[in-house]
Image: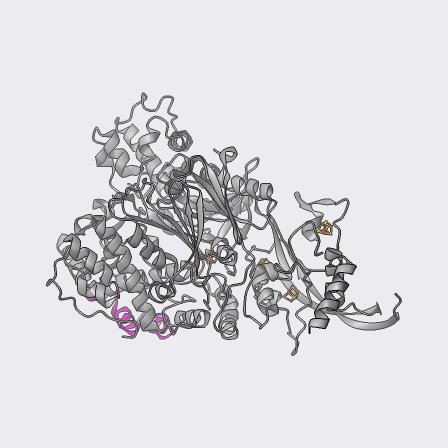
Amino acid sequence: MRYAETGFNLEVDLTRGNIERVRTDPAWTELYLGGQGTAGRLLWDRVGPEVHPFDPENLLIFSSGLLHSTPVPGANRTTVDTFSPQTNLYSHSLFGGFFGPELKHAGYDKIILRGKAPDLVYLWIHNDKVELRDATHLAGMGALATADRIREELEQPEAQVAAIGLAGENRVFMATIEHANSSASRGVGVIIGDKRLKAIVVRGTKDVNIARPAELFGISSPMYRAIYENEFCGDTMAHEDDEEFHVNNFAWGNARKRNLGFWNKEREERWKAITESVRLRWTGCYNCPKDCHQAIRLPGKQTYFQKCYSKLTYAMAAYEEIDFNYEILALTQEYGLDGFSTPQVLAFAIELYEAGILTDEDLPGFPSSGGERFFYLVEKLVNREGVGDALANGVYHAARQIGKGAEEFDHNSMKKFEQVPLKLKMINYPYFLMYATGEKMNITQIEGSYPQVPIADKEERQRFVDRWDAAPERFKKWFLEWEPRTHPSVEAAVNICDWNETMHYIDDAIGTCAFLSSFRGQFGGRPPYHIYNLPQFISHATGLDMDPDKLWKVGHRNRNLIRAINIRRGLRRADEKPPEDHWKIRDPEMEKRLLDEYYKFKGWTMDGVPRAKTLRELELGFVAEDFLERGILTEGDDSAPEQASAGE
Amino acid sequence: MTSEHTKETKIVKEIKIDLDKCIGCRACEVACSAFHARPRYSSTNPARSRIRVIFDALNDVYVPIRAGDYTPAECTGRHSYTIGGKDYQECSFCGVACPARDYFKEPDSGLPLKCDMCESDPTLEVPMCVQVCTCDSLTYHEREVEVTASEPREEMEVGLEALANKYGWERLMDTAARLSKKG
Ligand code: SF4
Ligand code: SF4
Ligand code: SF4
Ligand code: SF4
């Protein structure tokens, strides 16, 4: 019997309309657990480097996590994995809500989509009954409105829907896939649109087996209160009205300027009042006691959900106030646009206009205020109209398509992707490494276990470390030694990057929310889930004999597998450069040393390629063989140092 | 059918539901289905839960309802309510297992499900759904009331009646007779 997973994937060929239920290999569960891990293996096996993201051979994979539909609270993140036309690299996103658990109750761990539908369709999965249905009548409809319409049409109020809006349909690169109160971004919405799939609708009523049910329930049920009462987890910032951190530390406009002095008490009061007047309620995700998502309704507009720091991104990019942000979100959420990269693209266009690179000819009737300009540009963008066609390809490509010096204004992308515009003064070692080497494109998907700032008071520092259950011993030592305004050692920086990313790779395989785990150690150091308690949840759910060392190794395996996918598509050291102005004061020598040491630590070559020995030790021998065959690696260049484990 | 009617006091177990506090997490569904799975906790399947959250997110409607009785026929007419500017359908407040919808029916057999207040041995201090509702949208209260008691209908009786409504008494009796001979 298969435990915690269904043991089946759904394979959908959109070109032919062919649908198959395919049994999965339990050995893969032991190696990669599930979610992003097993999706990575599928992408490695089935999508060669020659496949362009817009080719029908590109796969788009929706994966539930291994712990979805078990009683483990907060296991609900669905991963979406494919290749992005913006980066021509691996593209990965996650969304919360209710989708993954519903999919498993329908009897599937994954939906694997290939090909392209001749016309707009949606996929309807009702337990064993799966069909593609015409969606031409839904063309142009907003994402959440589409979900409602389909549920009505099918008379299935309980069905869970993931849908795209106009942006995805028009293959806008920053399109999202919207589901309930959550969205998947970072290059997956454009691919579902390219495949002409408007929505996936799931209703599942089957049971999912659990290996040791009473034990699993026994350790899961105290987690509700533990999570609920833990002030350091969930989207803590979403609940704060003091926005000083984001407003002061993140760059405004096109990731250019900091706006110090903008934030004050009076503004906080005003913004708070506005937010309270538009918020209907806070909402959560499947089986999680936190409530990270605001349901927002403006007079005369449709309800939408606001999450994460999209509360501010449009306002800061347009130099506007928070009411503007809520207004434009009402539109961009229904179009299905990513709240991180979209504002940067729009602000980039304004910069070009102000520099005379874009003119009134490109932007006829261009308004004068930041806010009105954003509304104007959004329409161009989602319709790929005029200059919007270039903008819809992201800042990197738009700059090159527009030319005339526009490249100079592309100063915040890396690996051709818009980065979070956190602009600080002094280079930060672990952050340099995370930005440079991250495969997940957004720093929020990489950072999170080790604290961002040291604690000045020595006693308080000791107290912090004393109850730091989530941390392997070596980090406690480094944290105790860490004085304000000093850098951690190179060794510590490398390890910090490694720990941070490893925890994300674990979350993204088992489906636990990063807000309860990998993202939430950095403030307070008390994530409800961590490397020392997760193995027990996994063991009881699956019957696997998991322990912290083994789990750490799975995290490394998945990390190297995803790395390998990108390496095979050409990613190398030269691409691992955070934007020039990311920190005011740079240290090229140290940056080189950090990267050298990180690669060495990871068992990679100085060009960032996982060595054959490393790969074989991680049971990724097939990757090593492929690299040797392609000449990406040559045998003999194999002296990877030992890697630290969770226990040290 | 008549039954003895007597006056007695008894503890009424009550779950209060605050619609404004509900975050729509469905932990109540997970916990209820786990508790009622056989073997206990062997599956968490909201489709088998005796509490369901009725969602209409665009209209800000989040209504947890517990399963009540079974009916073979849906209501002929229905109310809709406007409360605090929001529209609710009567069905959203109704815990009946009813042909109008899929809630409160075992997904395989279609048999009706009913909230039993987590009756078990030993008795739970607080029902499962309330235990996991950390934000207090669900709260548990006990109060003593004087009631006119009548024999409660047994689970089997309710189940049989549902089967009879689905297949007719004749087929049900035939099948029962056939199966009992086999056994
Ligand atoms: S912590 Fe927040 S985002 Fe994560 S699952 Fe819970 S409610 Fe959703
Ligand atoms: S557990 Fe409570 S908050 Fe969550 S859906 Fe149920 S009633 Fe609502
Ligand atoms: S669900 Fe309740 S209110 Fe609605 S039709 Fe059925 S019995 Fe009537
Ligand atoms: S009281 Fe018990 S049986 Fe009734 S809905 Fe709640 S958990 Fe289910």
A140 and A349: which one is in front?
A140
- Look at 46% across and 45% down and name the residue there: A178
> Where is residue A588 shown, x and y percent of the image?
14, 52
Residue A533 at what x, y percent from top left? 40, 72
Could you say which quadrant of the image residue A149 lies in?
top right
Between A5 and A308, which is closer to the camera in this rendering? A5
Name of the residue lying farthest toward the left: A636
Q: Is residue A279 left or right of residue A595?
A: right
The answer to whether one can see residue B162 in this image is yes
Where A430 sits versus A125, above or below? below
Residue A108 placement, left or right of A547: right
State the image coordinates of residue A51 (x, y, percent, origin top left). Answer: 27, 44
Give the number of marks.
0
Residue at x 40% of width, y 69% of height: A534
Ligand 2 shown in quarter: bottom right
Query: Residue A440, can we see it?
Result: no
Instruction: Identify the image's colour scheme: rainbow, by chain, secondary structure or one colour.
Output: one colour
Q: Which residues are magenta?
A: A462-491
**Front position in the image: A219 or A12:** A12
Q: Residue furthest bottom?
A: B122
B6, A270: nearer the viewer: B6
Is A56 situated above or below A283? above
Q: In screen coordinates, is A607 left or right of A277?
A: left
Q: Is residue A483 magenta?
A: yes
Q: Is residue B183 magenta?
A: no
* Quadrant in which the C terminus of chain A is drawn: bottom left
| Residue B89 % position (x, y) | 69, 46
